[in-house]
Amino acid sequence: MSREYKLNKSELGRLQREKKLYGQYLPVLKLKQEQIQLEESKLKKLMAKESVNHSNLGDALKPYVPLLADEQSPSVADLLKVSAIMTKEKSLAGIKIRTFERIVWPQFEVPYFETAPWLLRVLPMLKEFLEKEAELALLTEQHAQLVKELRKATQKVNLFDLVLIPKTNDAIKRIAIALGDQQVASVSRGKIAKEKKRVGALI
């Protein structure tokens, strides 16, 4: 539903002030949009890189899978119980996000001489694999958050750029034309009245 505007100078002044404000807000909104786009692009590249690293770690662990599945082997699940996943908050383009810091592992000593050499090798690899997995999960969360904020920023830019500013410009133009027509009509009426008065004086 189109908005109705009063065809007077007061409405014209109000719309001109609105136009000025829109002109001030739009560059700020576009800058915000560009910053989020930049961070989203950087994050996608980081996710791709870390995904490759995670995949490579998985490939390095494949030879040990049969050993890990051996019932005679120690329970890796017991050795790798996660005590906590530590995160910290940071700001990307003014948006607060959670980032991965580290995994807190339970404190225990692996008996060196009683543990198979392959298990001593594989435990640090498994920890790194799980840490990379946790980091990727948080990167995915960050990316979803940035995409959501980018959508909102783009909607705001489009609202100002494609709707509010053009409509305000159109309304200003229509009111200015109407006021001009009113002024011409007023001058014409004045001339007619003056002419009638002059003719009346001659009769």
Image (spheres, helix red, strand yellow):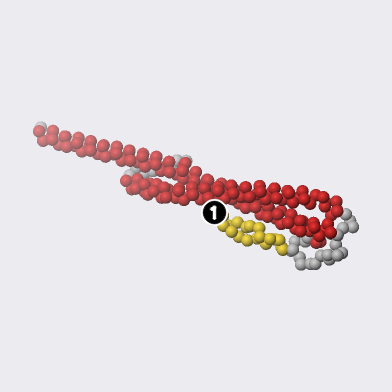
What's the residue at 70%, 50% (across, down)? Answer: 53
Q: Is residue 111 visible?
A: yes
Q: Tell me the kind of residue under disc 1.
A: Ala
Percent position (x, y) of residue 179? 31, 40
Q: Position of residue 133 (x, y in %)?
A: 71, 53
Name the foreground residue: 114 vs 95: 114
Residue for point 39% across, 47% down: 19
Please report the residue visible at 35 percent of the width from the left and 41 percent of the height from the top. 175
Q: Secondary structure at mark 1?
A: loop
The answer to which of 140 and 167 lies nearer the viewer is 140
Q: Name the side, left or right, on which 25 lies relative to 173.
A: right
Mark 1 packing: few (<14 Cα in 10 Å), some, or many (20+)?
some
Q: Is residue 152 visible?
A: no
Seen as rendered, the residue at the extreme left is 202
Q: Is residue 181 above or below residue 83?
A: above
Name the residue at the right extreme: 72
Q: Position of residue 195 (x, y in %)?
A: 16, 34
Residue 83 placement: quadrant: bottom right
Say which residue label 1 marks.
93
Residue 118 on image: x %, y %: 83, 57
